Image: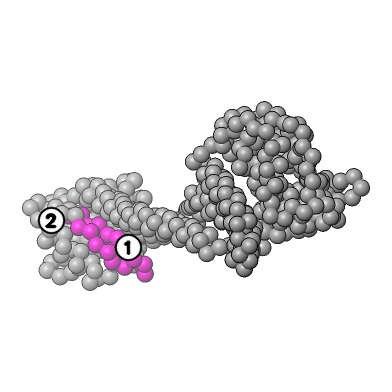
Amino acid sequence: MSSPSPAAARLHRARWVATLLFAATTAACLLVLAVIAVRTDGVSRANDLDHDVSHRADGLARTVYYDDGALHLEALEDDDLARSAEVLGVLDSAGQGRPRIRSASPSPAALPDAEALDDLWQQVRRDEETVLADAPGGGRDHHWAAAPVWDGDRIGAAVLVGADPAQGRAAHDQLVRRLALGSAALVLAAAAVGHLLSGRAMRPALRALEQQEQFLAEAAHELRTPLAALRLVVEGGAASPPRAPAALHEAVRLVDRLGRLVTGLLARARVEAGTQEVELTPLRLDQVVEATVEELPDRTGVTVAAEATVVEGDPELLAQAVRNLVENALRHGGGPVEVSVTAGRVAVRDHGPGVPDAQRARVFERRVTGAASTGTGTGLAIVRWVAELHGGTARLSAAPGGGLLAELLLPGHARAGHPLR
């Protein structure tokens, strides 16, 4: 396979850049959303934990009471909040020293150490409301709430409730992992979708670029022969003054042919670009074929047998197709070339080796090089393009007695304004 042209390679690179930009933009947006989700989840879990321990501590503090200076804890035994608490403790004052533990569940070892208990006690007495704190308990980090128990106008005790945040942290970490995996999957999906969309968006540009390159190749193919003939005629007239008038006449004829070629090429370029429709007009197909063969610079061995036939078509495009058929037969067929015109049919027969059945369809493809192609693979492709543009077809077959028979088949009444398909 041939390597893509620099312009096509730039379009392909632009497609990959667009894909990367699409994926990067998606990744940035997902990252922002994931960070917001992670932070929101973390704050929500922390708030839920604060609410749980403070709600339990406040509720249990209301079940504990003083009576004549004695602290009563009996109500804790039947309270659902007490039974469902992970860690529960009751502290009361012990003179001016550190608080003492009056009750602990499941055991005093599950409560914070003496220094942490003293800090919690001092905060409750200072703030005179429920306080929250983090401190180790039972060898693990816990979140604590301490609610005051009033003895008259002073705080005589505090109910301490603790909860292990490990379960919430595990759920939070699981959420982070799922968000990371989900975001990665979405970025890959976005990259794939972006690549497909950028490919679909650039497909018209690639098709237009390919058509432009094909048109340039075909234009060079069409103009090369008359330009070479014009050069030979001018050089011959310059080298031999007696031949100058005839050379000048031939040069004018070749210039006129070049003008028609350029006009046809421009019309074909506009049709392929979709900016113009072909205007099909009634014409004598036999006269178009005879005039085209007459203009060939080397028509030795070419004979024309034409019947009067009228079709609707573009004369320049039909002339181009006929010229390519005859020049292809001269270049690759060898021997005499016989051109015949009947109702809506132009047949060009040579006496060369022919083309195998398996290759007859491929020689009409652009840029195909073979025994019956035109070298650049554009001549017969133009023939098929012109035939389809007129609602007809082009085909190759084995000629009786050997050689190749190339046919351009046109309907008797083509539709005017038939667009390029």
Q: Which residues are magenta?
A: 131-148
Point out residue 21 in the picture as x, y percentages from the top left corner. 42, 58
Vertical placement of 163 versus 136: above or below? above
Q: Amino acid at mark 1?
A: His
Query: Which residue position holds label 2?
Result: 128
With 417 as the anchor, is 333 left or right in this view?
right
Residue that appears at 52% across and 41% down: 274
Query: Which residue position holds label 1?
Result: 142
Task: Looking at the picture, tell me which residue is in the foreground, 145 or 241.
Answer: 241
With 241 as the anchor, is 332 left or right in this view?
right
Point out residue 254 in the picture as x, y percentages from the top left corner. 60, 53
Point out residue 251 in the picture as x, y percentages from the top left corner. 59, 56
Task: Looking at the picture, tell me which residue is in the foreground, 376 or 38.
Answer: 376
Question: Magenta stretch: residue 140 in it?
Answer: yes
For discs 1 and 2, the disc positioned in front in the rendered view: 1
Check disc 2: other Cα within 10 Å, few if <14, some if 14-19, many if 20+.
some
CA distance separating discs 1 and 2: 22 Å
Q: Secondary structure at mark 1?
A: strand
Residue that appears at 36% across and 60% down: 164
Q: Amino acid at mark 2?
A: Glu
Numbered label attached to residue 234: none
Q: Secondary structure at mark 2?
A: loop
Task: Looking at the picture, tell me which residue is in the foreground, 258 or 213.
Answer: 258
Residue that appears at 85% across and 52% down: 351
The residue at the far front in this view is 242
Q: Quadrant of the C terminus?
A: top right
Q: From this viewpoint, is residue 211 visible?
A: no
Residue that appears at 72% across and 55% down: 298
